Amino acid sequence: MALAAALLVLSACGPGPDVSATPSAEASPSPGATAPVEPELVPDGTAEDNLPVFTSVSEAVWATEQRGAGRAYIDALIGAGFDRADMQVTQDVSTVGNTAESLLFSVRWGDEECLIGQVGPSTGQVVTAVMPQLAEGRCLVGSTRPIDW
């Protein structure tokens, strides 16, 4: 009896069934898997609700040859459904004709918040945030360029 018990214990310690041939769940795509969904404008949402689409649009422009052109960001945001009348953008060229080290653009959202984006060599990437509005419904401090195109 003791020998049978010892054999039972030893057999439990041995290698189990070969599972190397079993297909893994990671190796096969799950049925119904879909591609990531691009964020969309939520007109009745908050600034925070719309930060993903603001960021996505900004990153798409940053990935192009137009990454330093303020107009490209404004046009892309308008194309995504943001209102031109609520936007501000800083100059993308300095007073001596050099490319700006930092370009800021914004969309006023409601009566209290702003979606703000910053790009340029000084950041090296797209930086976006939701910030409180400044006095008189402005989002950016200082001089901005007219959006008159």
Image (tube, helix red, strand yellow):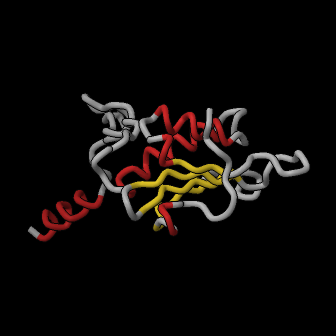
The residue at 39%/41% (across/down) is 39
Question: Residue at 58% of width from left, 40% of height from top?
Answer: 74
Q: Residue at x 64, y 41 (%)?
A: 62
- Residue 45: x %, y % from top left: 30, 51
| Residue 98, image x, y percentages | 87, 47
Question: Quick one: 108 or 102, which is closer to the camera?
Answer: 108
Please name the residue shown 17% across and 61% down the image: 8
Residue 83 shown left or right of residue 92 in the figure: left
Residue 61 vertical position relative to residue 90 in the rendered view, above or below: above
Q: Residue 11 at x, y = what percent? A: 23, 57
Quarter residue 38 falls in = top left
**Residue furthest top in the image:** 31
Q: Quadrant of the N terminus?
A: bottom left
Residue positioned most to the left: 1
Q: Between 116 and 4, which is closer to the camera in this rendering?
A: 116
Q: Is residue 22 above or below residue 122?
A: above
- In the image, taking residue 136 as reference, residue 29 lies left or right, namely left
**Viewport quadrant of the C terminus:** top right
Tell me if residue 143 comes above or below residue 93 in the rendering.
below
Left or right of 108: which side holds 99? right
Taking depth in this image into account, of 45 and 8 the one nearest to the observer is 45
- In the displayed structure, 59 sits above or below 126; it is above
Identify the residue at the far right of this view: 96
Count of labels in the image = 0
